[in-house]
Amino acid sequence: MQLIDGKSLANKVQTSVATEVEQLKQEKNIVPGLAVILIGDDPASHAYVKMKAKACEKVGFYSITHSMPDAISQEEIIATIEMMNNNPRIDGILVQLPLPKHVDTDKILEVIDPKKDVDGFHAYNVGRLVTNLDSFVACTPLGVMKMFEEYNIELEGKDVCVVGASNIVGKPMAALLLNANATVTVTHIFTKDLKAHTLQADIVIVGVGVPGLIKEDMVKEGAIVIDIGINRIADGSLVGDVDFKNVSPKCSYITPVPGGVGPMTIAMLLSNTLKSAKQRA
Ligand code: GUN
């Protein structure tokens, strides 16, 4: 069993982004800029946004965080996004999800300029991803693809089971895998027999937020298991969606939680923002 070390790969990506930022500054006088819009007081969202701002600072980006109260109107959020769309110093706009219940998330995401949509959530970018055209791709699934590349894990012809069909993880993950010529099964909350699907897969990728969902009798010997879940359990520790202790001995490769996919999400956000800044250049 080999651990896929997301923390060290994320550091490697960040170092390479920082080098390119320096070049972009020297040669074109451009500093990549990221605007983060954070609404409400969800502690997890605040923690993630803080990590994103810190990462931006580390690689030499310009970054601003617009923090707004939970009761903010949809119109005010839209006005802030439009301001960022028109701000020439901003290359990437990220609206931290989830949004408060009174806000229409789909509508908000559609207001972001697709050229600044570094989260890859806009329908324009999703459509381009599905048709295998160059686009901004959601950071978590993009980070998983980067892990496959780094560890020379071949995808062509592999049976991959994606557990979870969200717009921000499962669906873009499935599209990326299809584009890489894998045979993809997407399972979700209405799937009749989850185990029947995970058990036949060469690669299982799970991101649903259910601690310990994937158990040892659900994966085949030698499987590759990618755990996108991050769950805080009663004792305060962080665990994934995979019963790591019992599943890992069966795996050829597995990602830990923490230190697996999590750090890759932020690294790919930096990478996407740099890509946008280079397009501006
Ligand atoms: N909430 C959970 N994951 C994400 C993400 O990747 N991007 C944004 N904007 N919000 C999130």
Image: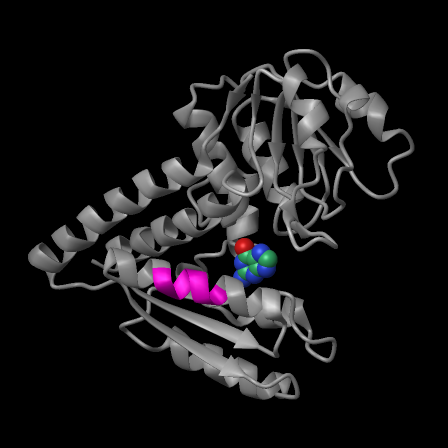
Quarter placement of the N terminus: top right
Pinpoint residue 102: horizontal percent, then vertical percent: 73, 80
29 w.r.t. 151: above or below? below
- Residue positioned 23% across, 50% down in the render: 18
Quarter placement of the C terminus: bottom left
**55 displayed left or right of 238:** left
39 w.r.t. 223: above or below? below
Quadrant assignment, res 141: top right
* Residue 99 visible from this viewpoint: yes
Q: Does 249 appear in magenta?
A: no
**116 displayed left or right of 179:** left
Pinpoint residue 91: horizontal percent, then vertical percent: 33, 64
126 w.r.t. 218: above or below? below
Pinpoint residue 261: horizontal percent, then vertical percent: 52, 40
- Residue positioned 21% across, 64% down in the render: 31
Residue furthest toward the right? 192
232 w.r.t. 104: above or below? above
Q: In front: 82, or 15?
A: 15
* Residue 92 visible from this viewpoint: no
- Residue positioned 13% across, 51% down in the render: 23
Residue furthest toward the left? 26
Give the magenta range.
Answer: 49-54
Quadrant assignment, res 164: top right
**23 displayed left or right of 109:** left
- Residue positioned 66% across, 41% down in the render: 240
Residue furthest toward the top? 221
In which of the image's four quarters is ligand 1 placed? bottom right
Main SS, magenta residues: helix
**19 displayed left or right of 256:** left
